[in-house]
Image (spheres, rainbow, N blue to C red):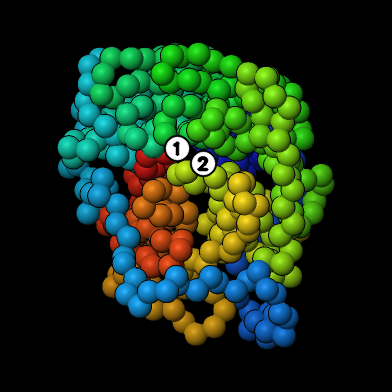
Amino acid sequence: MNGLRDMLGEVAEHAKVYDVTGRAVRVARRRRHAARLAPVAAAAAVVAFGAVAVVGLRPDPPVGQTVVAVPTVDWLPERLDLPASGPDPLPATGPVGRGVLVYADLRRDAPAPVLLTEDGRQHRLAQPVTSAQGASHTRPTLSPDGRWLGEQRDGRYVLRDLTGTARHQLTEGSSPVAWSPESRWLLLTDNLDEDAAPVRLDLTSGERRQVPGVDSERWQPVAVLPSGEAVLLGVPKGSTRRTSLELRLVDAAGAAEPTRFQFELRLYLRPAESVGWETPRLSPDGRALLFSVVELADPEQGMPGLDHGGELIRVDLTSKAVRRIPLPYADRPGPPAPSPSPAAARAWWNEPLGYLPEGVLLRLRTADGQGDALQVLDPATGAVGRVTELPARGPAVEFVWPRGS
């Protein structure tokens, strides 16, 4: 019993998601012996790597232009302000306007998550259903177009049209995995039944289809394409450095054989690096996936964490091309990088949140929590634009989920 309690705490602390039952417990068991992935910035490692030529690590040069446009995201506010008192509850019926983001406090007995809409209003969502350990079974989610809100409410997982009256109710324990870029499909798993097949929900009709042939110990559902095909990621066996990817595209209707992909990534990884365990982000055109890169430390120390990730690897499902995308970090090898925020301390890093038409959405995290912000990276040029200033970091905004994330 103590081992299970420790495992659930591990999920809440390190995986930093709401899922703590069913699938998440199984994933935690599988990953307890996985390599710990954390930043390693020792000078000796830099010198050692300096003698190694790895073609894939060279960042792509800017494409024939001398002036690089700074990317922006028009639908995100310039700053996120916390209300002086708790926001009013989300109206039970009727349109309220498209959502922009949800922010949440994950402490036990904390206030419910809060929805921010395009007109700047904030609405308190339902209080999450929690386990005995105080962590929620699932989390709220917004579709990429901001129209649909998913949340646990009254013992069901409810998808609600924020611009109208449509509503879809799923069983308790249903947990969102990923949206399709055009917001038609939502891929879900069941956190209360680890053997249940993933479900693809059609938001236009309410139709639900189980994704066939998914061995939960062998394949992890990670995305859903505009075509409706589910993307499955092969789960490595045992404790190993992850240097290759095995993917399958599965037709939820069962009308076609799965399409298989294999990507070998050793040329794009340093000797001490691995592909991370976090769910990859699907590009807006549905053609490519972004995977995190993390550095390998002691395999016996636990499971990886997104906060200390490195850069990104983009794999194209159409052309099969692979590209490494650098992210600005303060603790990368080499001369100290300039702080992106006047309030940021020496230690800061960017946490990927989503893949938007405007670029890769990042959360800038600072060591003292005083200079956090949402930023957007143009993966083609490397230009970074500051989008939203966040309040001084505390439990209330520890988690920020913009549209589609």
In the image: residue 229, left or right of residue 159:
right
Position of residue 67 measured from the top left corner of the image (x, y, whole percent): 32, 75
Residue 231 shows up from this direction: yes
Position of residue 211 measured from the top left corner of the image (x, y, whole percent): 65, 22
Q: Specify the quadrant of the image occupied by residue 220.
A: top right
| Mark 2, other Cα within 10 Å: few <14 / some 14–19 / many ≥20 | some
Position of residue 23 measured from the top left corner of the image (x, y, whole percent): 65, 30
Viewport quadrant of the N terminus? top right
Q: Which residue, given by chain and number where applicable, does mark 1 sit on?
A: 181
Q: Could you say which is closer to the camera, residue 95 or residue 103?
A: 95
Q: Is residue 280 above or below residue 94?
A: below
Residue 276 shows up from this direction: no
Q: Specify the quadrant of the image occupied by residue 63.
A: bottom left
Q: Residue at x 65, y 82 (%)?
A: 46
In the image: residue 184, left or right of residue 288:
left
In the image: residue 67, left or right of residue 176:
left
Q: Is residue 291 above or below residue 104?
A: below
Q: Residue at x 43, y 20 (%)?
A: 203
Task: Tell me the element at label 1.
Answer: loop
Position of residue 374 measured from the top left corner of the image (x, y, whole percent): 34, 55
Q: Residue at x 18, y 40 (%)?
A: 120
Viewport quadrant of the C terminus? top left
| Mark 1, other Cα within 10 Å: few <14 / some 14–19 / many ≥20 | many
Task: Tell me the element at label 2.
Answer: loop
Name which residue type carries label 1: Pro
Name which of mark 2 and mark 1 comes first in the sequence: 1
Quick check: marks 2 and 1 in contact, CB under 8 Å? yes
Q: Is residue 225 above or below residue 331?
A: above
Name which residue type carries label 2: Gly
Q: Which residue, given by chain and number where applicable, does mark 2 sit on?
A: 286
Q: Residue at x 52, y 57 (%)?
A: 307
In the image: residue 77, left or right of residue 361:
left
